[in-house]
Structures are given as structure tokens and as C-alpha cells.
Image (cartoon, rainbow, N blue to C red):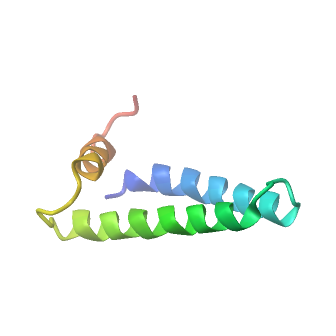
Amino acid sequence: MDNFLVFNNAYEVVTLNIKASINDGDFENSKFIEKFTAGFARYYFHAIDQISSEDPNTAESWKKFAEVATVDTAP
């Protein structure tokens, strides 16, 4: 799971930039962006829990993400 750190670090940067843009009033509909960002976070952390526990109900897209994230070489 260490290779997830690359995505997690990128995700943190994007999230912090979205938060700054919301605070700066850069979005026409900040409430929607806040809900969208929080919704993705819930999906992502739920998927990480499923991947970690090897839940057979993990969505195929997240299984592929986990597969790619476990490769020891960068693309």
C-alpha cells in the first residue's frame, strides 16, 4: 500500500487547492464543489477500506487502481 502515497500526496495537493479556490470565491457554485469534493473523499476512503480488507465487493475500477498502485515501477 506504500505506493498509494503517490496518489494520496497528489490528492492532498488538489484538495488543498480546491479548498483555497472555494475560500477565494473562484467557483460559481462553491457548495456544489464542497459536496463533490467531500463525496469523492467518502468514496475513496471507503474503497481504501475495501481494498485493505480484500473485500470481494470492491468496485472493479478501485481494484484496478489498487493493482496499479502496487506496481513497484513508475509509468
**Residue 60, position as x, y percentages in the image:** 21, 48
- The picture quadrant where one finds residue 54 is bottom left
Identify which residue is drawn at 20% across, 60% down: 58
Does residue 17 appear left or right of residue 67 in this picture? right
Identify which residue is drawn at 49% across, 57% down: 8
Which quarter of the rendered picture does the C terminus lie within? top left
Q: Nearer the viewer, residue 38 or 1?
A: 38
Does residue 66 appear left or right of residue 55 in this picture? right
- The picture quadrant where one finds residue 73 is top left
- The picture quadrant where one finds residue 12 is bottom right
Q: How many marks?
A: 0
**Residue 53, position as x, y percentages in the image:** 18, 71
Identify which residue is drawn at 40% across, 33% down: 74
Identify which residue is drawn at 66% across, 60% down: 33
**Residue 41, position as x, y percentages in the image:** 49, 66
Q: Which residue is most to the top?
A: 75
Does residue 21 appear left or right of residue 18 in this picture? right
Which quarter of the rendered picture does the N terminus lie within? bottom left
Q: Nearer the viewer, residue 10 or 45?
A: 45
Q: Nearer the viewer, residue 2 or 44?
A: 44
Does residue 2 appear left or right of residue 52 in this picture? right
- Above or below residue 9? Residue 41 is below
